[in-house]
Image (cartoon, helix red, strand yellow):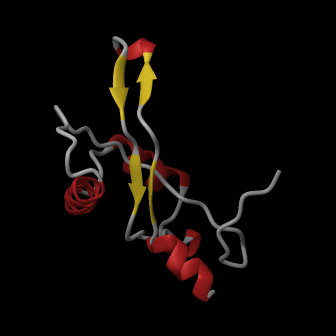
């Protein structure tokens, strides 16, 4: 549980990726940070996920992630920022896992 709690607050940054379908624009993806957990017994339903994905995301978290990106890449001038909501799923025992 302790490891998962740390993992849930961790931040990741992906290297620049070119998206041809978006006019060959380049994007640096950053994510993570403080996660709000949805519990199925407390409204974490498919409808709640649909509502989450139709929104603009958490502006406070986006600002925090922009600050982290600026601290990690201080010499980089980003032309713009865009946010998209995302989710992290956990197994029934609460662990964050990737299985192949």
- Left/right of residue 55 with respect to residue 79 in the rendered view: right
Q: Position of residue 45 (x, y in %)?
A: 53, 59
Identify the image quadrant of residue 15: top left
Q: Residue furthest bottom?
A: 2
Q: Quadrant of the N terminus?
A: bottom right
Q: Residue furthest front?
A: 75
Q: Where 59 falls versus 54 (above or below)?
A: below
Q: Write the residue at 70% across / 64% down.
A: 97
Identify the image quadrant of residue 78: top left
Q: Where 6 falls versus 56 (above or below)?
A: below
Pick whichever, 37 or 95, lies toward us: 95
Q: Write the residue at 19% across / 57% down.
A: 63
Q: Write the residue at 17% across / 38% down.
A: 77
Q: Position of residue 100 (x, y in %)?
A: 83, 50
Q: How many marks?
A: 0
Q: Residue furthest right?
A: 100
Q: Write the residue at 23% across / 63% down.
A: 64
Q: Position of residue 33 (x, y in %)?
A: 38, 66
Q: Position of residue 24 (x, y in %)?
A: 37, 13
- Left/right of residue 53 with respect to residue 91 in the rendered view: left
Pick whichever, 33 or 27, lies toward us: 27
- Left/right of residue 95 with respect to residue 22 in the rendered view: right
């Amino acid at each position: 549980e302790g490891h998962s709690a740390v993992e849930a607050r961790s931040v990741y940054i992906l290297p620049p990726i070119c998206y041809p379908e978006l006019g060959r624009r380049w994007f640096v993806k950053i994510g993570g940070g403080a996660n709000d957990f949805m519990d199925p017994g407390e409204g974490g339903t498919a409808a709640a996920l649909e509502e989450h994905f139709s929104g603009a995301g958490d502006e406070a978290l986006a600002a925090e992630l922009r600050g982290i990106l600026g601290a990690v890449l201080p010499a980089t001038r980003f032309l713009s920022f865009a946010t998209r909501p995302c989710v992290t799923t956990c197994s029934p025992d609460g662990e964050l896992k990737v299985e192949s």
